[in-house]
Amino acid sequence: MTLQDHSEDIGQVIIHHVANSDVLFPLFIFGFDISITKHVIMLWIAGVVVITGFLVGSRQYRHELNPVPRGFSNFLEAVVEFIYKDIATPNLGAAHAARWTPFLLTFFTLIFTANILGMIPIFDLIPGSGTATGNFNVTAALAIVTFFAIIFAGSREHGFIGHWRNMAPPGMPWPVLFILIPIEILGMFVRPFALTMRLAANMTAGHIAMLAILAPIFLLANPWIGIGSVALNVGISFLEIIVALVQAYVFTLLSAVFIGAAIHPEH
Amino acid sequence: MDKLISLDTGLIFWTWTTFLIVLFILATKAWKPMVAALVRRQQSIAEALSAAEKAREETAAMSARYEEQLQAGRQEAQQVLSVARAAGEKLRSEIESAAQAQAESIVSKAREQIEAEKRKALAEVRATVVDLSLTIAGKVLERSVTSADNKKLAEESLGQIGEA
C-alpha cells in the first residue's frame, strides 16, 4: 500500500475512534428512535457513578444536622461548596444560589465524570468513542437545558413577559432597539451554541490529537516512532485530565453566568 | 466524517433523561442536605465568632470596671491611711504635751518641797546655833546663861546677824 492509502485508513480509524458507535440495541418508543449507542451507555455509566458516589458520600448529611465530613464525604463537600460558593453565589446572588446549586452540580459532576470516563481505555472494548461529551448531540442537549433554564430563571424572577422585556434596557432611545433586539435574540441562541461547540470540540480534540500522534507509527511502519509517540501521549493525557476538569467547570460557570444575567438583567 | 456531526435525537433524549434522573435523585438526596449543612455551618461559625467577640468586649468592660474599683479602693485606703496618720500625729502631740505638763508640775512640786525642807532645816540650824552660842557664851563668861531673858537677847542678836 502507498502512504496515501494508509493516510485514508488512518483518517477512518480516527473518525471511528472519536465518533459514536453504530446502534447497539435498536429501541423505538411511539415510533421515536431512542436506540442505544455507546454514548448512551457511557452517559448511563456516568450517571450511575455520580448518583452512587454522591448517595454514598452524602449519607451523614441526610442523618445528621451538623455532619463532620471525613475522607470521601469531605471531598464531595468540597465540590458542592465550590459550586455553591464560587460559581452559584457570585453569579446568581446569595438569594438564588442555594436553589440553583443542585442544577449546576448536575452539570458539573455529570460532564466531568463523562469527560474522565472517556479517558479510560477499557471502554474501547465497545467500538466507538468513549467520550459521550465529545458528541455534539450530548452537549447540545445539555446546552438546550441551559437555554430553557435561562428563560425559566428570568420568567420566575420578572414574570414571563418581564423576562423578554429585559432584553431591551429601559431608557434606551427607540432606534437603538432595532439593532439591540436582533442582537439579543441572536445572543440567546449563540450562547448555548457556544456551550455545545466548546465542550464537544474540546473533548474530541484531545482524542484526535492523541490518535494523530500515534498515526506515524503505522504510516511509516516504524515501531521506534512509538517511543516518542507514547511519551508525548502520556503528557497529553495529563493535559486532558486538566481539560476534562476545566471544560466541566467552564460549562457550569457559563450556565451560571447566563442564568444570573437573566435574574439580574441590570448587570 | 458525517457520523461525527450527524443528528442523533435518541442520544439527545437519553442525555435529557440522564440529566433529569441525576438532578432529581441527587438534588433531594444529596445536594440540598449538603448545601443546607454548609449554610448551617457557616451560620454557626458566624454566630460563634460574634459570640466570641461579644464575650471579649464584655471581658474588657469587666476588667475596666475592676480596674476602676481597684483604683477607687486604693484611693480610699490612701485616704484612710492619711486620716489615721493625722489622728496618730494629733494623739502623739497631745500625749507629749500632757506628759510635758505633768513633768513640769512634778518638778515644781519637788522644788516647793525642797524649799520647805530647806526652810525647816534652816530653822533647826538657827535653833541649834542659838543653843550652841549660848552654851559657848556661858562657857566664856563662866556662868550659866539660862534665863529666858538672855535667850531672847541672843535670838535677837542672831536675828540681826541673819538679817545682815
Image (spheres, coloured by chain):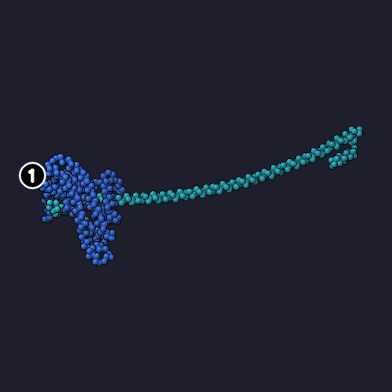
Hue of chain B? cyan
**Residue in the foreground of this view, choosing between A143 and A239:** A239
Q: Quarter of the image containing the C terminus of chain A?
A: bottom left
Hue of chain A? blue
Residue B134 placement (x, y as % from top left): 88, 36
Residue at image point 82% right, 37% down: B125
Chain ID at mark 1: A
Residue at image point 26% right, 63% down: A169
Q: What residue sits right under mark 1 in the picture?
A: A1
Left/right of residue B161 with respect to residue A117 in the rendered view: right
User: Can residue A266 be seen?
Assistant: yes
Residue B65 placement (x, y as % from top left): 47, 50
**Residue in the foreground of this view, choosing between A260 and B30:** A260
Residue A191 placement (x, y as % from top left): 21, 57
Q: Residue furthest left?
A: A1
User: Can residue A16 be seen?
Assistant: no
Q: Quadrant of residue A227?
A: top left
